[in-house]
Image (cartoon, helix red, strand yellow):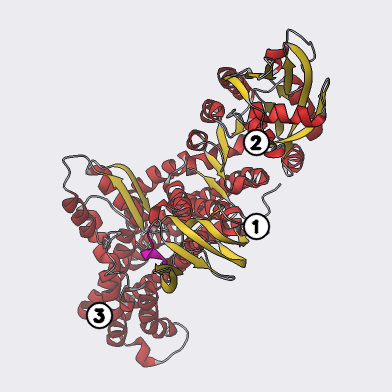
Amino acid sequence: MHCTNCALSVSKYLEKKGMQEVNVSFATEEVSFIAPENADSTEILAGINQLGFRVVLPEDTTVKNVPFYTTLGFKFVFCAIFTLPLLLHMWVNWSWLHNPWVQLTLTLPVYITGMLHFGKSAYRSLANRLANMDVLVSLGASAAFIYSLIGTLVFKQTDYLFFETTAAIITLVFLGNLLEEKSVKQTTSAITELAKMQITTAKLINTDHGHEHISEVDNRTLKSGDCVLVNTGDQIPMDGTIYWGNGHVNESMISGESAPVAKSINDKVIGGTLLEEGSIKMFVTATGKDTVLSYIIELVKQAQADKPPMQKLADKISSIFVPLVLSISLVTFLGWYFIGQIPFSSAMMRSIAVLVISCPCAMGLATPAAVMVGLGRAAKKGILIKGGHTLEMFKNIKQVVFDKTGTLTTGKLQLNAYHFSGMTEEEFKQIVYSLEKYSSHPIAKSIVKAWKSPALTLQQIREHKGLGMKAQDKDGNQWQLGSFKLANQVTTDDSHNLYLLKNNELVGWIDFTDEIRPEAATVIQQLLQVGIKPILLSGDTSRKCSELAGKLGIREVYAEQTPDQKLEQIARLMEIAPTVMVGDGINDAPALAKATIGVSLSDATQVAMQSANVLLLNNNLGALPLALGLGKHTYLTIKQNLFWAFIYNVVAIPVAALGLLNPIIGAGVMGLSDLILAVNSVRLRYKNVSK
């Protein structure tokens, strides 16, 4: 495909054939669709071929290289060689350049090349009743060529010669398409760079009679369960788990954070990341499409193919654009020739100028170019945005709702303080350890890890969900360890996490602190600076929520909320203003799905990640302000691009129709219009989006 109108033609053809969920990307040159059960896929693919495109299936590796003479670069250079002498005759008075036969000889190779490229595409699009931009280019170039040919063969007068117009139109449109192609490829560079990381070599470990043999292989040949050696400076070949050694891994391509991450035995590593220091041996746990990197690339591609509502409007306009321009061109010719009574040649030139200056591609390129850059930059910073429609929702976000545990805090409980009476500290720790070693609760695991000691012999050990542990020792003492609900008969103090009871008497308590994420306070301040209100919505106690909110600077707090109540609160808040919900647990999933935009962390539960519109990789809450800023500025760039695309055509077509532009200048301006959109989109890669 050499323009966005090509993508629109393929899309319209597939929709006409009854295909569903059609996604056609000009920038990545990829098409995907779901065919009905009774559809003949061979016939569908043959139909795309008949439109003038070559279909390459993902598993087909034999046709990757395109012959150089079919590229836009070669066609432009070839045509330019013949076109430059033709244009030269307008400035120098060399008699041989004014000879009509010389001009015909120079124009013929350019015209044939143009018709094989634009003409073939135009014919096939018309045959399928899907007129594209190549129809306008072919008609404009052909009108000037045929008129000049008749002048040379029949009238033999130089007044009829517009051969340089024919050649210039074709050459300049080739140049415009070439610039557009190169500029649009820049918009996909972030994803291209990620894709390159998928292919590397691997040091495969084979064990023979207890001896290890290492051989270098293509990482794409690895299978789950293979053992691989990775040394300092090596790229980790596939996702895996370390079983020997340690080191520091640069995961910036996943998280956007440049600081290396320490890794040791049993830690997971991600394919494509770089081992900056150390040496490790790892089991391969995922290959091919199952890897984290493949998941990221696929998710970004899907998001880039997803069209925001604004683009759907632009596509509708683009579909009627070519017939509209043809009508305006015809009216221009008839009006000037019959009403304006100017010469036939002048009326024709103005009509041709209308054809070649109009640019339906600009409207088709406006959104994809911006979306490609925005989502690509986000992916490189560890932010996955699911769908172009999500970008459009960023524009009016006024409040961000945070869950507490695992979102604003790390979810890792740390022992803070404890108290005991009627026993020694060692006895207190021993009885607590002996009870908690049988519990599956996260708090219990934290205690067991911190207070490991010889366990007491206990009988009738029971775990009561929502309350705690109960057991009896060899002396017949009844022990209970659990929440305030278990101790509310013997104390009114509900400020502690765990209470230890002996024979229904309070003999100790333990407090834990949930570690606040290091970046949480900075994130809250950044949101406040741009006028976005942070809100805390949690199932935890009012005291703990208020305490956390006070430390972070959050003024609006909703505590002790069930999943149903969270959903109701989100619905109520959305009535006030568009709302982002940030959460990580199963109980957050309904609220994430309900919010204007749901944001989940990468170590969240699977259901939370599936419910969210945005996924922050590497569990990095600090990427949230960048995600909000990128979404807002990508939408702003889309608006700028669409404004330019519409205003360009609204102004340029009447200017050409009024005779204020000749076709050569029109063809050049048309090529530049797409370039302006692409350059404006590429600015997103470097733009400060924090404002």
The residue that appears at 42% across and 81% down in the rendered structure is 87
Q: Secondary structure at mark 2?
A: helix
Mark 2 crowd level (few <14, some 14–19, many ≥20, 10 Å Cα): many
Residue 584 in sight from this viewpoint? yes
- Comparing labels 2 and 1, the label whose residue is closer to the camera: 1
User: Residues in magenta?
Assistant: 219-223
Q: Which residue is mark 2?
A: 407
Q: Main secondary structure of the magenta part?
A: helix
Residue 486, numbered circle: none
The residue that appears at 75% across and 37% down in the rendered structure is 528
Alpha carbons under labels 1 and 3: distance apart? 78 Å
With respect to residue 85, does 452 lie above or below?
above
**Marks 2,1: beta carbons within 8 A:** no
Q: Secondary structure at mark 1?
A: strand
Residue 672 in sight from this viewpoint? no
- Comparing labels 3 and 2, the label whose residue is closer to the camera: 2
Q: Which residue is mark 1?
A: 262
The residue that appears at 29% across and 75% down in the rendered structure is 113
Mark before the other along the chain sequence, 2 or 1: 1
Mark before the other along the chain sequence, 3 or 2: 3
Q: Which residue is mark 3?
A: 152
Front residue of this view, candidates 212 and 457: 457
**Amino acid under disc 1:** Ala
